[in-house]
Image (spheres, rainbow, N blue to C red):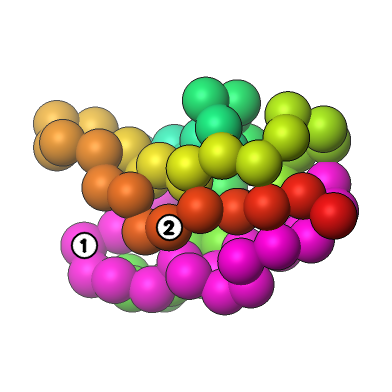
Amino acid sequence: MTPHHGPGGTALIITGTGYVGPSIIVAFGGYPAVATVISDGEPVAFAPDGPGPGPVEVYVIAMSPSNPGTFTYV
């Protein structure tokens, strides 16, 4: 995923396979974020305001969550 840090509202690109909207949910430190799938392997999520640093988790309906990394607020 890129980038690994930024303020609320930062667009985070998550690479992988099998991501198909609207069945994808992205959470920043447990806080849900708006996510849009640009293509099958590239969802974009916008960091919500202010929950603090924490893991980014990607949930796809009927699958276990993945954790592509940690996002730190600056």
Point 48% across, 46% down: residue: 56
Point 16% across, 36% down: residue: 64
Q: Residues within 10 Å of mark 2 (few under 14, many from 20)?
A: some
Q: Nearer the viewer, residue 29 or 40?
A: 29
* Amino acid tagged 2: Gly
Q: Is residue 21 above or below residue 18?
A: above
Lower sequence index among marks 2 and 1: 1
The reply to whether the magenta stretch includes residue 7 is: yes
| Residue 58 x, y percent position in the rendering | 37, 45
Q: Nearer the viewer, residue 43 or 58?
A: 58
Q: Decide if residue 22 is in sight here.
A: no
* Amino acid tagged 1: Gly
The reply to whether the magenta stretch includes residue 28 is: no
Q: Is residue 45 above or below residue 34?
A: below
Q: Nearer the viewer, residue 39 or 63?
A: 63
Task: Identify residue for label 2.
Answer: 69
Res 53 quadrant in image: top right
- Range shown magenta: 1-21
